[in-house]
Amino acid sequence: MKLKLLALTLLAANVLAAQENLTNPEKTEFYEPVPKIVAPATKIGEAPSDALILFDGKNFDNFVHDVDGSAVLWTMDNNRVLGRQYTEKGPAVKWKLNDDGSMTVVGGTGGIKTKQLFGDCQLHIEWRSPMESDSLKGQKKGNSGVFLQERYEVQVLNSYKNNTYTNGQAGSIYKQTPPLANACRPMGEWNSYDIIYTAPRFRRNGSQEQAPTVTVLHNGIVVQNATVIQGSTEYIGAPKVSAHGKGAIKLQDHGNAVSFRNIWIREL
């Protein structure tokens, strides 16, 4: 009998609490945590107040060439690599710095990557394919790439009236997921990528607990929507999954004179 009375009492209390929630809006309101204040840019595409400017057209101070002997590996007790810490030393960037505030790939010099390492992030980058001969087609036309954590590529390509395999066109997760739309502007015109990236999570034994995901807006159009990245970008063979920590943002030298400008990032 006592147990029955207790159950009825608890039920009545729950009913009263539910009724109070329906009649008292303050019961479903909270005031902490308070979101930080971030001042938005005055113009679309420009950096908000808390962004790190990676490239503003003035210099290559935030970049080194991809072949960089200044990397120092550090690991946990189980020898799983967590990340790299770069020094200021390293090969000077040999790409061209232009008067219009952009930089251009110099074919054969190799890709470049940020000195600073990133995980979850919001990345804005603008790119332009060069004016090239109509004899160049497919992957030979305006080819480059934006690599997240040095291993997951968002493809850069002149995909305006230029046919190629769909998981290799602009806005694709290269050799994995084609874009939802072809939003490419004609060659010689500027394109923008806004990338929201969630880095993978790994267990202490090195196994993957959560795959990386990415959302990409190409010229303001969603072309990747919380897409699961299957693993590292591979030209031949299946993607590979291996434990890692933060990594650089890398821009690819594929031999084409692709230009980049207005690169900024927010750590999430």
Image (cartoon, rainbow, N blue to C red):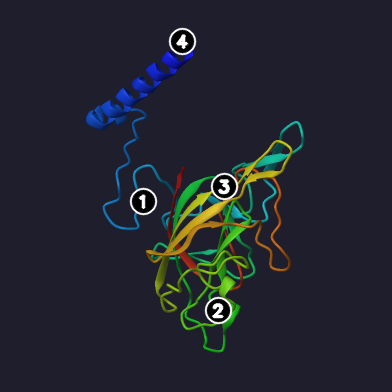
The residue identified by callout 1 is: 47
Q: Circle 3 — which element?
A: loop
Mark 4 or mark 3: which is in front? Answer: 4
Q: Nearer the viewer, residue 12 or 135?
A: 12
Q: CA distance from mark 1 to mark 4?
A: 65 Å
Q: CA distance from mark 1 to mark 3?
A: 22 Å
Which residue occupies 63% across, 65% down? Answer: 109
Q: Are marks 1 and 3 in contact (CB under 8 Å)?
A: no
Any mark on residue 2, and which? 4
The residue positioned 51% from the left and 82% from the top of the image is 162
Q: What mark, if any, has residue 199 been given in the picture?
A: 3
Whether tag 3 and tag 2 are in contact, CB under 8 A, the answer is no
User: On the image, numbered disc 2 is attached to which residue?
Assistant: 141
Q: Amino acid at mark 1?
A: Ala
Q: Compared to 154, does 199 lie above or below?
A: above
Horizontally, residue 6 falls left or right of residue 236, namely left
Cα gap from disc 4 to disc 3, whole angstroms: 54 Å
Identified by mark 2, the residue type is Lys
Query: Which of label 4 and label 2 is nearer to you?
Result: 4
Q: Please name the amino acid that badge 3 sits on.
A: Ala
Callout 4 secondary element: helix
Pointer 2 with pointer 1, Cβ within 8 A: no
Tell which tag, 1 or 4, sits nearer the viewer: 4
Q: Inspect this view and state whether residue 92 appears.
A: no
Q: CA distance from mark 3 to mark 2?
A: 30 Å
